[in-house]
Amino acid sequence: HLSFYHLIILFMTTCPFLSYIRLHLGSTGTMFPGNIRFLLGFSFHLSIFLRFVFLSSKDDTAHYCIFYTHIYYIVSIHISDAKISLFYGIVYLWRIKQYIITKMATITLSAEKDPMGAAISDYFNHHRADRLRVFSSQFEEDEIPVKELFRSIQSMPVLERTALQMATGRILDVGAGSGCHTLALQEMGKEVCAIDISPLSNEVMKQRGVKDSRLINLFDETFTETFDTVLMLMNGSGIIGTLNNMPAFFQQMKRILRPGGCILMDSSDLRYLFEEEDGSMLIDLAGDYYGEVDFQMQYKDVKGDTFDWLYIDFQTLSLYASECGFKAKLIKEGKHYDYLAKLSLA
Ligand code: SAH
């Protein structure tokens, strides 16, 4: 899925290495034949030119790249020790990677890449929907019954109903979808704000009578409002994406939660997928955590990007929570390795 823009960014991130080669190896004259030296020199100058082009852009990724490229050049030109400047080059790449990761985490979807939103919108407007298909590199193709995204409080699983009962004060419904939980809470007379990265779902929520719905990513650092209860339902841990994101997630929760507040989250332990009949497990302990999965959805011809989704067992959740200053409490277990947890500041 590389766009032209990504290629430019990629080029920007590799130019320190090109200049490294040019400055420390190529310029000695004997290391490379003339045409290679010419190429290195050419890309060096092209990268300087591109930085000027980017300077006129308003995008902060570009500015970030330029900033670090400049630092890199200054360091590599003034410190003639090749190893030190190579070290700075690596630090620079790492910074760019971190930046791109956090940048990715704060985006919302575009309507062209919002299959679940398209399904929700279709079902709301026409009372029926096509198949919402789910692909994964780990599982067989599956489907989400769109109707279930519109479930009423009566047809919600008991874990969800419990969470709705427990939610108090000002509530944040994270990844609210069609707004089923938000609407139920509103009916119970509770104050609730719904957030979702799907523009189409947000539209439907407004039309269904959700009083406060926002197109916003949970990880968006500019989102500074505070809440007493953060609700994450329908395998709500999924939005965290990977275990690696746990610290960032809890960090954001510290910002968002009011004193005495809590997160109510449901998840499931995927171990049953790896369990043999005799109860033994077929899990590669050296591999990634078995609950880290990737998904991609499609509705009609609207195909979304692949995204990470985290299923987490209660033990692992508690471990990460306590490392991040939170305590986890098991509220209720469901029928099928699923559970509801309450996380609050320790
Ligand atoms: N809670 C709803 C919908 C669950 S599907 C229900 O129980 O029916 C998960 C929802 O989370 C989707 O609507 C998706 O767009 C949204 N989402 C995914 N990542 C998100 C993020 N980082 N921030 C906010 N919403 C997110």
Image (cartoon, rainbow, N blue to C red):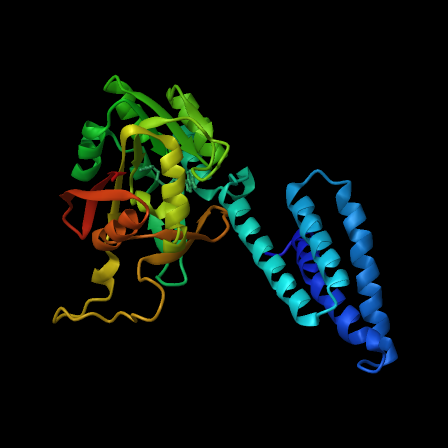
The answer to whether residue 98 of the structure is visible from this angle is: yes
What residue appears at the point 29 percent right and 30 percent down from the top-left corner?
181
* Numbered disc total: 0
Q: For the point 21% across and 33% down, which residue is it?
A: 163
Quick one: 314 or 98, which is closer to the camera?
98
* Quadrant field for ligand 1: top left
Q: Is residue 175 visible?
A: no
- The foreground one among 275 and 284 is 284
Percent x, y of residue 265:
27, 40
Above or below, 210 relative to 331:
above
- Relative to 211, does residue 109 appear above or below in the rendering? below
> For this view, does 123 lie left or right of residue 48?
left
Rendered location of residue 107, percent (x, y): 52, 41
Residue sitting at x 47%, y 46%: 300
Residue 146's x, y, as percent? Answer: 35, 40
Q: Quadrant of the C terminus?
A: top left
Q: Nearer the viewer, residue 286 or 132?
A: 286
Which residue is at the far left? 278
Q: Quadrant of residue 93?
A: bottom right
Counting from the top left corner in percent of width and height, residue 177 is at 38, 35
Residue at point 78%, 57% (across, down): 47
Which quadrant is the N terminus positioned in? bottom right
- The one of 206 and 11 positioned closer to us in this rendering: 11
**Is 9 on the left or on the right of 150, as rendered?**
right
Q: Is residue 200 above or below residue 115?
A: above
